[in-house]
């Protein structure tokens, strides 16, 4: 029997597993999870000395300790037995301990080297019990999934068996979390752990001592469990707010001081950033910029920086950080994640070295995130049977990701932003035979970049949506694209400046009339605007794969046709501002001209200034109509006009109305307005499509 054991721990689930087995075997045992704010990560000398003074004779580390060289020496000096159980990458020197239990021990031959910390603890429990401790599987699965280890081999076995146990759990702590999150036990999956259970359990240690989380998992009292669950949920909400605040600051810091074009590895930090959540912030920066990232919390008084790191495929964090060990007195981790402590004065040197290593090891292609597509599925083949068959591959996780499906070229019967802040996107994919609901979390802004009637290709993960006892397939969107050019219609838009701000970069602003700048107050965009006044100028504008904005009405369709001979734009935005509309002014018919000419034949002369309005009122015409017909007659030399007095040429030769420049211009403007301003969306798109150059240009294909 162990007389008095002291656990120096890190992971909550690992602690719970080891506490359970030792207590079951009759050990006098207590657990101790170092406070990451005051003690840092893993074992520390002060805690070991306290344990010795308190009468503990054995220290067992769980999910930590493989890098505790100094602390192991202290334990030996104090006469303490030290057993290390860990899964983090071993360094070149191992601690001196009574035993080191590690799946990658350099002197071992364990066949599976990717156990989580809780997995190692579970294997120790297996050995101590002498049989598989199935009652601990529900704890082992939480830590295995939360630790983001590969869900293959033994980890997959632990996760699959553990999920079944979780679905039948009677542990008050887990039941309390399920109740708090409105989760049905029988519906628990790896996603429930990853998004509902693990974040709450981990939130405690990120903000304070992690002890309440261990107590939640170990308690047998329902009332205590419910109270602890509420406290932990409140801390999780606080953690989310802190993460959001730091993330905003970190994003601004990168964009202002460490542009990704110059820094292939991001190393940023600030005083008073909460060291418990900076690992989450690092993950968010990797997601945003796709660069290996270290986020540090500066302590000016202690002259130290504590940090968490996350990486990308192709850049082994542990290996590269290992080349900088002289800068990192405390450091440990995996190829994709690590934690560290260093002197503030060494931060710049660490950044410089890691960037240099990245430049030597990575190419431009390595900085482009790649989504592996498992299968292309026609929309009509997406049904409940298919989705449920895919479910047999679960549980999903690292190295066993949920299958990614590609659905190509389908229409949209609806598209809208959802959520209280409209940050999410809901689409209904439709091919006239089948429809499929799709949700894109955090993708609400995409709605501004998908034009009506567009067909989209989407990548996502299929799932079953159950609501009011109705089960149907749905797609969780991860990316989408539009394969052809798009038309965005802002004709008649009243808030033009606000609309223009939303047009993405790589844009070309086209103006046909200089007066439009003042009319629309476009001075702030004047450096971007290209004035196109004739066909030759239009042919010089590069529009291929650009976002072109047609701000105002052209004087003729030939200018647009000339513009579109230079390639195929990705997007065309149309506003077609025009000060005067010709379409809704009267375009006199031949009978109008015939009556007016007969009227002049009788009168011989007519005073436009004096009687023009009376004539218009008598005929039910506009005064503009009278003036326009008078101008046409003058150009055709049917009349002369002098100071408003019209005089008929009785011997004028017969001429066609179309010979009048004014008649030609007005007729052309009316037709152009009909084509560009007053056509339907589809009619305008078809008209532009006919004029796009297609003989030597490839289709534009861009992921949005």
Image (cartoon, rainbow, N blue to C red):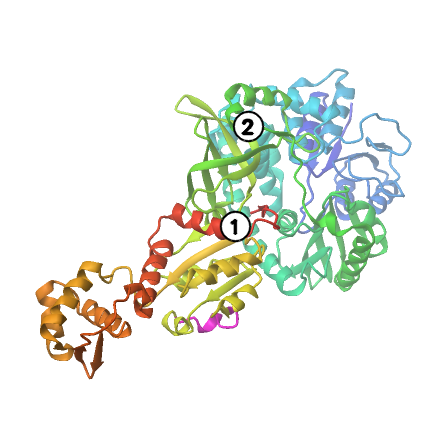
**Horizontal side, residue 541 vs residue 352: left or right:** left
Q: Residues within 10 Å of mark 1 (few under 14, many from 20)?
A: few
Is the Cβ of the residue at disc 2 closer than 8 Å to that at disc 1? no
What residue does disc 1 label?
A: 241
Quadrant of the snapshot with the N terminus: top right
To which quarter of the image does residue 304 belong?
bottom right
- Name the secondary structure under disc 1: helix
Q: Is residue 653 magenta?
A: no
Tell which circle, 2 or 1, labels the residue nearer the N-terminal end.
Answer: 1
State whether residue 691 is above or below residue 555. Answer: above
Instruction: Give the residue at x 80% y 30%.
Output: 113
Regarding residue 364, the answer to whether it shows in the image is: yes
> What range of the chain is rendered magenta?
521-529
- Name the residue nearer the viewer: 434 or 329: 434
Instruction: Give the residue at x 32% y 60%.
Output: 670
- Name the residue nearer the viewer: 72 or 80: 72
Residue 138 lies, in percent from the top left, at: 62, 24
Report the residue that reaches farthest toward the right.
107
Residue 386 lies, in percent from the top left, at: 56, 21
Instruction: Give the residue at x 36% y 61%.
Output: 495
Instruction: Give the residue at x 75% y 20%.
Output: 126
**Horizontal side, residue 261 vs residue 322: left or right:** left
Mark 2 or 1: in front is 2
To which quarter of the image does residue 245 belong?
bottom right
Q: Is residue 528 magenta?
A: yes
What residue does disc 2 label?
A: 378
To which quarter of the image does residue 480 belong?
top right
Q: Residues within 10 Å of mark 2 (few under 14, many from 20)?
A: some
Disc number placed over residue 628 in the picture, else none: none
């Amino acid at each position: 029997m162990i007389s008095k054991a002291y656990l120096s721990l890190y992971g909550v689930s690992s602690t719970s597993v080891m506490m359970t087995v030792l207590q079951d075997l009759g050990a006098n045992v207590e657990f101790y999870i170092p406070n990451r704010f005051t003690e840092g990560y893993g074992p520390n000398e002060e805690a070991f000395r306290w344990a010795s003074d308190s009468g503990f004779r054995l220290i067992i580390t769980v999910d930590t300790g493989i890098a505790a060289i100094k602390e192991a020496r202290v334990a030996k000096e104090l006469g303490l037995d030290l057993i290390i159980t860990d899964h983090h990458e071993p360094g070149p020197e191992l601690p001196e301990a009574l035993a080191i239990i590690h799946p990658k021990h350099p002197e071992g031959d364990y066949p599976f080297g990717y156990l989580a910390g809780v997995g190692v603890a579970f294997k120790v429990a297996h050995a101590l019990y002498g049989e598989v401790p199935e009652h601990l599987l529900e704890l082992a699965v939480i830590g295995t999934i939360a630790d983001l280890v590969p869900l293959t081999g033994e980890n997959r076995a632990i996760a699959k068996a553990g999920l079944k146990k979780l679905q039948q759990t009677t542990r008050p702590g887990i039941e309390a979390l399920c109740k708090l999150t409105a989760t049905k036990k029988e519906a628990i999956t790896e996603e429930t752990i990853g998004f509902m259970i693990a974040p709450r359990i981990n939130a405690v240690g990120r903000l304070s001592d992690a002890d309440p989380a261990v107590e939640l998992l170990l308690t047998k009292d329902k009332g205590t469990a419910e109270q602890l669950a509420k406290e932990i949920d409140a801390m999780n909400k606080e953690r989310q707010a802190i993460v959001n605040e730091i993330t905003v600051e970190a994003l601004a810091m990168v964009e202002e001081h460490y542009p990704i074009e110059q820094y292939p590895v991001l190393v940023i930090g600030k005083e008073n950033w909460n060291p418990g959540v900076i690992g989450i912030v690092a993950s968010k920066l990797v997601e945003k910029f796709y660069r290996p990232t270290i986020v540090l919390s500066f302590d000016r008084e202690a002259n130290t920086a504590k940090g968490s790191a996350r990486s990308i495929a192709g850049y082994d964090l542990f290996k590269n950080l290992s080349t900088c060990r002289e800068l990192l007195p405390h450091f440990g981790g995996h190829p994709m994640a690590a934690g560290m402590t260093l002197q503030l004065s060494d931060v710049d040197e660490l950044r410089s070295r890691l960037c240099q290593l990245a430049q030597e090891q990575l190419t431009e292609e390595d900085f482009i995130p790649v989504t592996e597509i498992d299968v292309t599925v026609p929309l009509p083949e997406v049904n409940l049977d298919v989705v449920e068959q895919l479910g047999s591959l679960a549980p999903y996780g690292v190295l066993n990701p949920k299958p990614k499906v590609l659905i190509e070229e389908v229409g949209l019967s609806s598209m809208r932003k959802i959520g209280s802040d409209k940050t999410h996107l809901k689409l209904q994919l439709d091919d006239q035979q089948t429809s499929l609901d799709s949700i894109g979390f955090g993708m609400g802004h995409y709605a501004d970049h998908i034009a009506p009637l567009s067909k989209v290709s989407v990548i996502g993960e299929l799932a079953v949506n159950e609501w009011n006892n109705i089960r149907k397939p749905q797609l969780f969107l991860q990316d989408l694209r539009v394969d052809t050019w798009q038309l965005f219609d802002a004709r008649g838009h009243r808030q033009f400046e606000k609309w223009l701000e939303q047009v993405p970069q790589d844009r070309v602003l086209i103006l046909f009339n200089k007066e439009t700048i003042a009319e629309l107050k476009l001075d702030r965009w004047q450096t971007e605007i290209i004035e196109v006044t004739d066909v030759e100028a239009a042919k010089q504008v590069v529009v291929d794969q650009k976002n072109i904005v047609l701000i105002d009405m052209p004087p003729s369709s030939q200018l647009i046709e000339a513009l579109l001979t230079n390639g195929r734009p990705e997007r065309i935005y149309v506003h077609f501002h025009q000060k005067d509309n010709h379409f809704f002014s009267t375009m006199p018919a031949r009978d109008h001209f015939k009556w007016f000419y007969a009227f002049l034949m009788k009168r011989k002369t007519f005073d436009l200034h004096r009687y023009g309005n009376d004539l218009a009122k008598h005929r039910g015409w506009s005064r503009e109509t009278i003036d326009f017909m008078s101008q046409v007659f003058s150009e055709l030399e049917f009349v002369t006009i002098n100071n408003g007095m019209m005089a008929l040429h009785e011997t004028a030769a017969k001429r066609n109305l179309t010979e009048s420049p004014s008649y030609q211009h007005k007729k052309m403007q009316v037709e152009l307005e009909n084509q560009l301003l007053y056509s339907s969306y589809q009619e305008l798109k078809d008209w532009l499509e006919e004029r796009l150059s297609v003989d030597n240009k490839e289709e534009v294909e861009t992921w949005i």
